[in-house]
Image: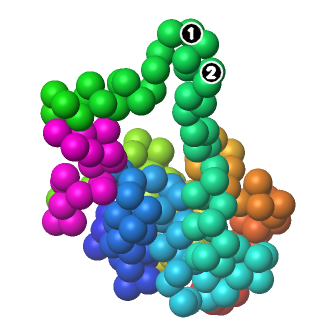
Amino acid sequence: MFERFTDGARAAVTGAQVQARALGAPFIGTEHLLLAIADGGDAMASLLAGHGLTAESLRARLAGMGRTPLDADALKSIGIDLDAVRAATEASFGEGALDSPAEGRRGDKGHLRFTPRAKKSLELSLRHAIRLKQRRIGSGHILLGVLHDKEFTAARLVGEAGVDVGELRAGVERALTARAA
């Protein structure tokens, strides 16, 4: 399948790993593919920016999405002392044992795996290219793939930014078919 990818699509896939690593994620998700496309500087990045979806705004939105800090007081009310847990863990396994692996223990050279949904979105990019009767898979097809399912983090991120996902997908399709004509 990757032999059908344009340079822009390949840049989106490799850029997704860079984005995931920069965010400290232990995997590559649909959100990282979306970020890589937004940061790509091509027509799809411009289309996203036209909807207010720049790489910077998406990164900021992603940083706050789904991250609920542990409430030490709530945990203490059920008998869990968060500071004691951290101290005991660090005493047994060393300082920073509870830190994310992406924050240094794994290093920057390890390969990050794609989540099942990110893999599915790449498969869907091929299906969208075929549906649009296009032989090559571009960054626009990947964008259609990451926006295909409302359960994908990328689609939720776009929707929570106040952008109509259906309208954005229609715009992507118009751009892809206009370029092919």
Q: Is residue 104 magenta?
A: yes
Which secondary structure lies at badge 2?
helix
**In this picture, residue 177 sits left or right of residue 159:** left
- Quarter holding the N terminus is bottom left
- The way the protein has been coloured in the rendering is rainbow
Residue 55's place in the image compared with 85, above or below, is below
Given residues 15 and 24, the one toward you in this image is 24
**In this picture, residue 119 sits left or right of residue 160:** left
Magenta span covers which residues?
A: 94-109
Q: Could you say which quadrant of the image residue 173 lies in?
A: bottom right
Given residues 111 and 125, the one toward you in this image is 111
Residue at the image position 31 percent from the left and 68 percent from the top:
2
Q: What residue would you read off at disc 2?
A: 74
Q: CA distance from mark 1 to mark 2?
A: 7 Å
Residue 121's place in the image compared with 72, above or below, is below
Q: Position of residue 50 (x, y in %)?
A: 77, 83
Mark 2 neighbour density, 10 Å: few (under 14) some (14–19) many (20 or more): few
Q: What residue would you read off at disc 1?
A: 78
What kind of secondary structure does the magenta stretch mostly adopt?
Answer: loop
Which secondary structure lies at badge 1?
loop
Mark 1 neighbour density, 10 Å: few (under 14) some (14–19) many (20 or more): few
Given residues 8 and 163, the one toward you in this image is 163
- Quarter holding the C terminus is bottom right
- Pointer 1 with pointer 2, Cβ within 8 A: yes
Q: Is residue 3 magenta?
A: no
Q: Which amino acid does the dot numbered 1 rest on?
A: Ile
Number of marks in picture:
2
Q: Which amino acid does the dot numbered 2 rest on?
A: Ala
